[in-house]
Structures are given as C-alpha cells and as structure tokens.
Amino acid sequence: MINKKLRLLGMMNYCLILLLVLSIGCGSLGFSSDSSKLGRYYQGKVLHVSVAEIERSGVISFSTVNPEGIVKNFQILPSSEKREIVRFRIKVENHTAATAIVNIEEKAVVLNDFFSNDFTPINIYDHEILEASDENSVSLTPLWNNLNSLGKSESFVLPRGTGIDGWMFFDVPVNTHFKEFKWRAGDSLGIEF
C-alpha cells in the first residue's frame, strides 16, 4: 500500500514537472523581436504583408508632416503602469490588383495573445499634442490613414507594384506574447507566431 502511494506521488511529481516545462516552453513561443517570422512576407488574395520589426516601450513621441505640409505632434502612453506600448513596423504591398484600397484604422489589425485576448491598434489622432515632446522621441512613419484638411480619414490607394511601410502601436500588458497577427485592411490574412 505504501509502495503504491509512493509510486503515485512520484508520477504526480513527474506530471507537475512536465506541465511546468511545457508551460515555460509555450510562454516563450510568442512573437518576439528575434522571431523567424520577422521580415517574411505573407500573401493574401491581393496584398503581401510583412511584420518587419517590433519594439516595446513606455512613452513614444513623434511628429509627422501630412500631405498638405502640416506638422502634427503625437505622444502615446500606456494606459496604466502594468501596460506598455508595443509598436509593429509593417510593410504592405500590392502585387496583384490594378489598384488596392487599404483603409488603415482601428479594425485594420487584430493581435491575439495565448489567452485569446484581442488587441487593436491605437488611433494616433487620439494622441495628438500641441507641442513636440522630447520624451522618448523617435523618428518614424506611422501606418495610419491620413486626415485631410476637413478632418476626414483618407484610405491609401496602392497601384500594382507599390506599397506602404510604417508603424502601428498597441497598448498591451507588459511582456505580452502574441500568438497571431490578423491583417484586415484591403485583404484578409493571418500570421501565426
């Protein structure tokens, strides 16, 4: 009887250790800056999409110049101390259609983590500031629809053989590991990490 209990206890310890090793392994499978998925193009029906880089930070400040020559300043902060801003550099190219209309806004991308949480991109225009900030100031091109002089959003028009390259921002819990990147602007495709 004691031998059976010891054997059962040993098997339970073995199972617990195995579960621990598997959970640590699964936690490290998420998309990271050294992932083999970075820089590879994935093809939908019309568009080719690549996640070229990812970076994590707290505050991000940047300025842009719109097509009409107006300078706009932005500062994006995490929504709480337990969150961070993750930025994805994304390249989108049209190699198929004569013209592709790409509407890049909150519904353009959905990121999923391993707990089935969805994260959508931050609308940069909700974070416009009057004066440029030096706090974590970076030089980049955001990947987001432009606003015209009337304040209306303008989709990108991509003739065949052209593309766009820029950064999208996500407010996520610190150290979130992503399972899937779903592109929904002008096409539909998923990249599993």
Image (cartoon, rainbow, N blue to C red):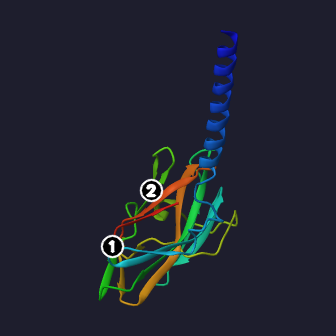
From the viewer's perspective, is residue 26 above or below residue 15?
below
Residue at (58, 70) in percent of width and height = 38
Residue type at numbered disc 2: Thr
User: Extreme top residue here?
Assistant: 1
Measuring from the top left, give residue 11's x and y in whole percent.
64, 27
Q: Which mark is residue 120?
A: 2
* Quadrant housing the N terminus: top right
Q: Depth check: 90 or 192 in front?
A: 192
Q: Is residue 74 visible?
A: yes
Q: Is residue 66 visible?
A: no
Indicate whether 113 appears above or below 92. Answer: above
Secondary structure under the numbered disc 1 in the rendered image: loop
Nearer the N terminus, badge 1 or badge 2? 2
Picture coordinates of residue 177 (x, y %)?
A: 58, 52
Residue of label 1? 186
Task: Sort mark 2 into few (<14), some (14-19) or many (20+) by Cα contacts within 10 Å.
Answer: some
Q: Residues within 10 Å of mark 1 (few under 14, many from 20)?
A: some
As helix, strand or loop, the secondary structure at mark 2 comes to loop
Residue 187 image point, x, y percent: 33, 71
Task: Name the foreground residue: 120 vs 142.
Answer: 120
Which residue occupies 35% across, 71% down? 103
Residue 48's quadrant in the figure? bottom left
Q: CA distance from mark 1 to mark 2?
A: 16 Å
Above or below: residue 175 compared with residue 188: above
Residue at image x 36%, y 69%? 185
Residue type at mark 1? Gly
